[in-house]
Image: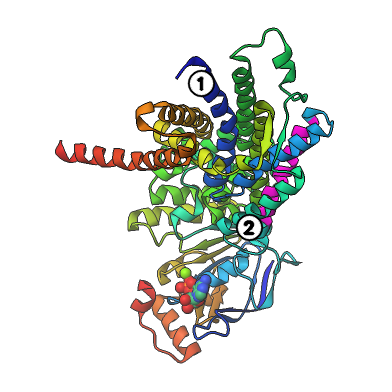
């Protein structure tokens, strides 16, 4: 792995760190396993790309992408809460619908953004531009989002949202409007993921329907690897752990795909991801077993 | 102040498992009343409290709090009026939130939750004072996850959480039943103090007839979803457990041995 590949993996890791924070919000904080993400990531990319090629300001396009993602999350919440449908199923419904909707939005399976003005254009055109510019921009964005999310989750509203996921009966008894928290939480989560999709299409120079599948596993991998490695106890470290987990996930998969003797190709990425997530899920249990074993010996 | 009129609650209606948990309960609770509710297993005590809190909607009947009809309000909408302590210490607090976060959550009961920070210096100061009275050393452990505490400690915190904000009535459902006898006695004493100090109106379910006579000013017995007796004032003075059994016998025509109630 050379420096270019390394920085590329870090950049992608930071970008998917936004997805990871979205997944942390739904899976962990709200205890709502939400697969909508696989659809809201390309949705963000699609909305952003079509607006940019239609001549809109890239910042406005990015903002609209966030709104579209929020609407997707809201839809899943509505199906689940209003019609009392299991969270996973509700999210699969939205996800399935998004396959068609994303194609409708783009009008074709992919849109190239080469030569278009994106939010990254000023960086690329400046004479300071080098290998580290985009990763630095992503780092700043991810940090900003992390701090905002942390601030929100420390607020009265955010605390109500955390209680909703952790003990819904108690949250209700304390006057938390739990349904609204689910709406808000899923909208935030998918808005973040759509933002990541918009940034992805702008930094990679294209939006493509195929960028969706694998988003949820990347987010989960980041969250679970972060937990396995850093064992976070408070909300701030949980947020940081999932972003670090995301960077690590990109590095490890890049290394695995680069090891010639393994004979892996890009299309083996899902397999590598599944194995990685599996290992990360088993690690805490193995650690507990080893500790037990040591304790029983002494 | 709290008026429940002809409450009926049926579970699994229209199936072989149909179960009429409440069959016409009418109850008037005055401001400052401390009502102890007793009754055998399955008598409908928890269902009555759940209906009051909004966890269960009655088939028919009305619930008024301060003349406001709350029958169709959901649990969180009734939270400004009803504070609650559950039987299960795990149910009333949030294990993976810290002690101070749990208390901060309770500070928001009945208030609009905003984007302001949930915790601040004033709140922490207030929490320390409140926890200090328990003499459990919890005032120095504000940042510990509440899951690290024992059931008794969590129940004590649940009581404090209940009174951080004003309410019309506090509902306690066998909140000492899951505790060892010594801890149960501590929590019961704490309950008595807190209710007295804050002049609360309380509805407490207990499995002990002794408690039901010692505590509060009114004793009420449920049986098969109905109120079989409801004693207060002079009539309640000097009443013994054996008198309660007698009352039950007269009202229902059934014999009831002390154990079946005490154990349930
Ligand atoms: N959620 C429920 N679903 C079905 N049946 C219930 C439910 N809750 C209570 N019941 C039934 O209603 C009756 C009254 O229960 P409950 O109010 O819990 O009694 P207790 O007086 O012991 O607290 C019991 O027969 C119980 O099995
Ligand atoms: Mg009960």
Question: Which residue lies under the disc numbered 1?
Answer: A5
- Residue extending farthest to the top is A127
User: Which quadrant holds residue B4?
Assistant: bottom right
Instruction: Please name whichever residue, A192 or B55, is drawn nearer the observer in this view of the structure.
Output: A192
Identify the chain of the residue marked 2, using the numbered disc in the image: A
| Image coordinates for residue A188, horizontal then vertical, percent | 66, 41
Instruction: Please name whichever residue, A60 or B262, is drawn nearer the observer in this view of the structure.
Output: A60
- The range drawn in magenta is A60-78
Question: Which residue lies under the disc numbered 2?
Answer: A93
Disc 1 C-beta below 8 A from ligand 1: no
| Residue B110 shows in this picture | no
Look at 68% across and 78% down and name the residue there: B61
| Image coordinates for residue B261, horizontal then vertical, percent | 39, 76
Look at 47% across and 31% down and name the residue there: A249
User: Which mark lies nearer to you, 1 or 2?
Assistant: 1
Instruction: Please name whichever residue, B127 or A230, is drawn nearer the observer in this view of the structure.
Output: A230
**Mark 1 touching mark 2, by CB under 8 A?**
no
- Residue extending farthest to the left is A297
Q: Is residue B211 above or below residue A293?
A: below
Direction from residue A54 to residue A103 in the image, left or right: left
Magenta portion: prevailing SS class: helix
Q: Label 1's element?
A: helix
Instruction: Please name whichever residue, B129 or B241, is drawn nearer the observer in this view of the structure.
Output: B129
| Image coordinates for residue B14, horizontal then vertical, percent | 57, 85
Identify the chain of the residue marked 1, using the numbered disc in the image: A
Gap between marks 1 and 2, in whole Å?
37 Å
Give the mark nearest the N terminus, 1 or 2. 1
The C terminus of chain B sits in image quarter: bottom left
């Amino acid at each position: 792995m050379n420096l270019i590949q390394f920085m590329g993996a870090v950049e992608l890791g930071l970008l998917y760190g936004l997805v990871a924070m979205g997944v942390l919000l739904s899976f962990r904080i709200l205890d709502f396993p939400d697969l909508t993400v696989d659809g809201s990531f390309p949705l963000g990319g699609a909305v952003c790309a079509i607006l940019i090629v239609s001549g809109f300001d890239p910042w406005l396009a990015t903002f609209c992408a966030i709104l579209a993602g929020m609407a997707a999350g809201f839809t899943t919440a509505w199906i689940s809460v209003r019609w009392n449908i299991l969270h996973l199923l509700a999210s699969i419904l939205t996800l399935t619908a998004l396959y068609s909707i994303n194609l409708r939005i783009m009008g074709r399976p992919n849109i190239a953004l080469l030569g278009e003005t994106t939010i990254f254009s000023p960086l690329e055109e400046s004479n300071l531009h080098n290998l580290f510019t985009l990763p630095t921009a992503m780092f700043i964005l991810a940090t900003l989002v992390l701090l905002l999310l942390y601030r929100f989750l420390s607020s009265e509203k955010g605390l109500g949202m955390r209680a909703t996921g952790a003990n819904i009966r108690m949250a209700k008894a304390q006057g938390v409007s739990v349904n609204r928290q689910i709406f808000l939480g899923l909208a935030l989560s998918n808005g973040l993921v759509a933002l990541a999709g918009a940034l992805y299409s702008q930094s990679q120079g294209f939006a493509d329907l195929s960028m969706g599948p694998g988003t949820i596993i990347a987010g989960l991998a980041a969250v679970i690897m972060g937990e396995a490695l850093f064992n976070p106890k408070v909300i701030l470290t949980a947020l940081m752990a999932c972003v670090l987990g995301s960077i690590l996930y990109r590095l490890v998969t890049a290394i695995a795909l680069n090891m010639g003797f393994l004979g892996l190709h890009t299309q083996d990425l899902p397999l590598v991801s599944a194995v990685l997530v599996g290992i990360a899920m088993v690690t805490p249990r193995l650690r507990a077993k080893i500790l037990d074993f040591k304790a029983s010996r002494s | 102040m709290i008026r429940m009129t002809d409450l009926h609650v049926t579970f699994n209606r229209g199936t072989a498992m149909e179960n009429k948990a409440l069959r016409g309960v009418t109850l008037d609770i005055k401001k400052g009343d401390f009502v102890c509710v007793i009754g055998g297993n399955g008598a409908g005590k928890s269902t009555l409290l759940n209906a009051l809190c909004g966890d269960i909607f009655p088939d028919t009947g009305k619930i008024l709090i301060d003349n406001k009809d709350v029958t169709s309000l959901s649990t969180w909408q009734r939270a400004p009026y009803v504070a609650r302590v559950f039987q299960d210490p795990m149910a009333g607090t949030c294990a993976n939130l810290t002690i101070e976060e749990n208390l901060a959550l309770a500070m928001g009961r009945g208030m609009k939750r905003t984007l302001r920070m949930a915790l601040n210096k004033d709140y922490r100061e207030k929490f320390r004072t409140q926890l200090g009275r328990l003499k459990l050393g919890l005032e120095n452990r504000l940042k510990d996850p509440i899951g690290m505490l024992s059931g008794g400690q969590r129940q004590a915190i649940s009581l404090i959480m209940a009174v951080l904000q004003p309410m019309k009535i506090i509902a306690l459902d066998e909140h000492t039943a899951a505790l060892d006898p010594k801890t149960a006695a501590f929590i019961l004493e704490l309950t008595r103090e807190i209710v007295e100090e804050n002049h609360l109106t309380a509805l407490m379910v207990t499995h002990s007839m002794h408690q039901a006579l010692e505590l509060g000013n009114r004793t009420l017995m449920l049986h098969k979803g109905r109120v079989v007796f409801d004693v207060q004032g002079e009539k309640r003075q000097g009443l013994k457990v054996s008198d309660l059994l007698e009352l039950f016998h007269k009202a229902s025509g059934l014999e009831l041995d002390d154990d079946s109630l005490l154990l349930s």
